[in-house]
């Protein structure tokens, strides 16, 4: 009997879109042996030379001119991609996508970025019959996500659902599933084993993440955290930013025995299990992973636009606060050193998580679609 096939299209503008696609793919395979999945970053797949150049330019813009990114986001907030734009995207960048779909013959297509979503929507308008679902990977609903040909939307919260309804999407096409996280985030792992594997001490621990791009070194307050290293263990994860890692390792402030500087790792889920506090930019994926683990979060320098919306959601739910001053660091770093305080805080957040978020729900919802 042929397995049902789910084709997930993502894009390389940031790492969260593709992480969400892989998380959903792995979740589906965890729940059913009868599902076959394929994740494709469509721009790079179809344009292996041009694609990486475009994404590199976007990365530089995000790191050097975040206000410009926010201005573009807000300036087009209520404007979906029109027919001419979808045509241009298709012809200039995604002209072979129909061949990819024809070759892989999926039973369901899920897009985790607006660009492939717009292009597949255009193909639906031209006669493609494969169901198309859109997984919105933030806690906001920019108009570029919406297209009339989309069969259904999988969204993070009821607020995002209401925003889509306000944009004219029928309520019957929207399901609040939460953003999927990899099955490794569904359950805790053995603490002692993690400490041994990463050569960590059993002491108050802060995990500091710069996202997949490792955008954190120039932060004055990041360096300020190192002054607590005698009493607080610090784990800095700088993603694939090897230049930042080398620079930090060459700095005496980051060579304390209670400080670890890590590059890219697939075991963030384990590091979260042994950490009492997460310091991160408010990307939708990382914040959802932190919520799944019930770890309190401090957010720094949100990129104007969707990261600001993510920040507002997690602060309003009690999962953390904006790292606005050194006083914020002082208060939280003292808190996690108090006996049992970190455990009580995590228990409280897990109770909130259990009421608001089920890490398996998105995969279960898609599995039900396939049945």
Image: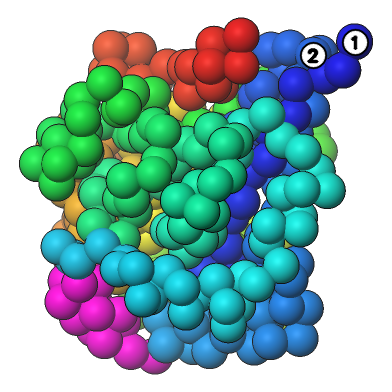
> Mark 1 to mark 2: distance in Å?
9 Å
Closer to the eye: label 1 or 2: 1
Q: What residue would you read off at disc 2? A: 34
Secondary element at image label 1? loop
In the foreground, 199 or 96:
96
Please tell me how many numbered marks the rendered image carries. Answer: 2
Q: Residue at x 19, y 66 (%)?
A: 79
Can residue 14 be seen?
Answer: no
Asked if the stretch drawn in magenta spans residue 68, the answer is yes
Can residue 153 be seen?
Answer: yes
**Disc nearer the start of the sequence (1/2):** 1
Asked if the stretch drawn in magenta spans residue 354, the answer is no
In the foreground, 253 or 20:
20
Q: Give the range drawn in magenta.
A: 63-76
Q: Disc 1, disc 2: CB below 8 Å?
A: yes
| Left or right of 6 on screen, residue 103 | right
In the figure, residue 261 lies in which quadrant?
bottom right
Q: What residue would you read off at disc 1? A: 1
| Left or right of 34 on screen, residue 127 | left
Q: Is residue 329 depicted above or below 28 in this figure?
A: below
| Left or right of 125 on screen, residue 252 | right
Q: Is residue 182 depicted above or below 324 in this figure?
A: above
């Amino acid at each position: 009997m042929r397995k049902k096939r789910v084709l997930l299209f993502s894009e390389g503008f940031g790492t969260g879109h593709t992480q969400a696609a892989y998380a959903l793919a792995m979740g589906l395979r965890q729940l059913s042996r009868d599902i076959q999945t394929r994740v494709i970053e469509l721009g790079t797949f179809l344009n292996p030379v041009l694609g990486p150049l475009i994404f590199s330019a976007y990365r530089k813009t995000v790191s050097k001119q975040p206000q410009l990114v926010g201005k573009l986001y807000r300036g087009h907030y209520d404007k979906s991609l029109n027919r001419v734009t979808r045509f241009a995207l298709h012809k200039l960048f995604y002209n072979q996508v129909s061949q990819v779909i024809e070759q892989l013959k999926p039973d369901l297509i899920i897009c985790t970025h607006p660009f492939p979503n717009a292009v597949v929507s255009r193909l639906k308008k031209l006669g493609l019959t494969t169901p198309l679902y859109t997984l919105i990977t933030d806690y906001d609903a920019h108009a570029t996500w919406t297209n009339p040909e989309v069969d259904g939307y999988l969204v993070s919260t009821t607020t995002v659902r209401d925003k889509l309804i306000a944009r004219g999407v029928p309520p019957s096409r929207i399901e609040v599933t939460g953003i999927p996280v990899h099955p490794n985030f569904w359950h805790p792992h053995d603490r002692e084993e993690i400490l041994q594997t990463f050569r960590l001490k059993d002491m108050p621990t802060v995990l500091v993440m710069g996202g997949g791009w490792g955008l954190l070194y120039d932060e004055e307050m990041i360096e300020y955290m190192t002054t607590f290293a005698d009493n607080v263990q610090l784990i800095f994860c700088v993603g694939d930013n090897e230049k930042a890692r080398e620079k930090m390792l060459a700095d005496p402030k980051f060579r304390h025995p209670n400080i670890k500087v890590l590059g890219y790792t697939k075991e963030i889920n384990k590091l979260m299990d042994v950490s009492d506090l997460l310091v991160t930019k408010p990307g939708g994926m990382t914040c959802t992973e932190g919520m799944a683990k019930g770890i309190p979060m401090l957010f720094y320098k949100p990129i104007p636009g969707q990261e600001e919306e993510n920040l507002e959601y997690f602060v309003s739910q009690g999962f953390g606060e904006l790292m606005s001053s050194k006083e914020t660091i002082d208060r939280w770093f003292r808190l996690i050193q108090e006996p049992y305080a970190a455990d009580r805080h995590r228990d409280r957040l897990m109770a909130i998580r259990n009421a608001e978020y089920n890490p398996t729900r998105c995969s279960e919802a898609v599995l039900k679609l396939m049945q």
